[in-house]
Image (cartoon, grey):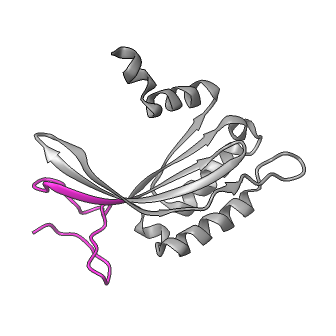
């Protein structure tokens, strides 16, 4: 028996300090992906199931829990990103998804395109990291965004063949 805390629904949280992954062949996570782009912003909530393969874990299942509406990335008159409007958007999407920030085990925040060049881009990333929970934040300039598109579309794999 693993000594872990759980909520009233019996969900065991992945990031509990006392958790040991030794002996766990399957790990279930709830993840959020946030993309703040030059023109649009959106979120995706997913349930991931990882299974142990020797000494590492591989994602064996992905389940889409909620995909947000696409928001036109809000800017203020001085061309900075409107962090308050983005915060309200995230709060709304959590409510629609039936999730709370403490339900999130992992996630990623990606700032892309012109959004990453805004003076307050780093501050927006930090706000989201505090608001949403355990996340990896990445700023993707034009080069990284192009690479992500090439790999995501399968173009790289196709060109290798």
**Residue located farthest toward the right when viewing the structure as drawn:** 77
* Residue 74: quarter of image: bottom right
Residue at position x 23%, y 57% from top? Answer: 27
Drawn side of residue 130 relative to residue 98, left or right: right
Is residue 158 rendered magenta in the image? no
Drawn side of residue 101 relative to residue 56, left or right: right
Residue at position x 27%, y 60% from top? Answer: 28
Residue 51 is situated, as x and y percent measured from the top left of the image, at 18, 50
Drawn side of residue 132 relative to residue 158, left or right: right
Viewer-proximal residue among 158 and 48:
158
Is 115 above or below relative to 19?
A: above
Residue at position x 58%, y 31% from top? Answer: 145
Main SS, magenta region, reads loop
**Residue located farthest toward the top when viewing the structure as drawn:** 160
Is residue 24 rendered magenta in the image? yes
In which quadrant will I find the C terminus?
A: top left
**Magenta highlight range:** 1-30
* Residue 114: quarter of image: top right
Residue at position x 9%, y 55% from top? Answer: 23
In which quadrant will I find the N terminus?
A: bottom left
Residue 159 is situated, as x and y percent measured from the top left of the image, at 41, 16
Residue 120 is situated, as x and y percent measured from the top left of the image, at 74, 45
């Amino acid at each position: 028996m693993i000594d872990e805390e759980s909520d009233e629904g019996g969900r065991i949280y992945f990031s509990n300090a006392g958790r040991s992954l030794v002996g766990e062949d399957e790990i279930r996570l709830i993840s959020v992906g946030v993309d703040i782009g030059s023109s649009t912003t959106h979120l995706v909530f997913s349930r991931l199931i990882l299974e142990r393969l020797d000494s590492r874990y591989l994602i064996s299942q992905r389940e889409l829990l909620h995909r947000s509406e696409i928001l036109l990335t809000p800017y203020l008159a001085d061309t900075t990103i409107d962090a308050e409007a983005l915060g309200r958007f995230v709060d709304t999407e959590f409510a629609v998804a039936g999730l709370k920030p403490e339900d999130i085990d992992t996630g990623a925040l990606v700032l892309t395109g012109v959004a990453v060049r805004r003076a307050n881009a780093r501050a927006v990333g930090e706000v989201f990291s505090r608001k949403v929970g355990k996340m990896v934040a990445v700023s993707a300039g034009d080069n990284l965004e192009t690479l992500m598109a090439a790999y995501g579309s399968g173009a790289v794999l196709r060109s290798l063949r």
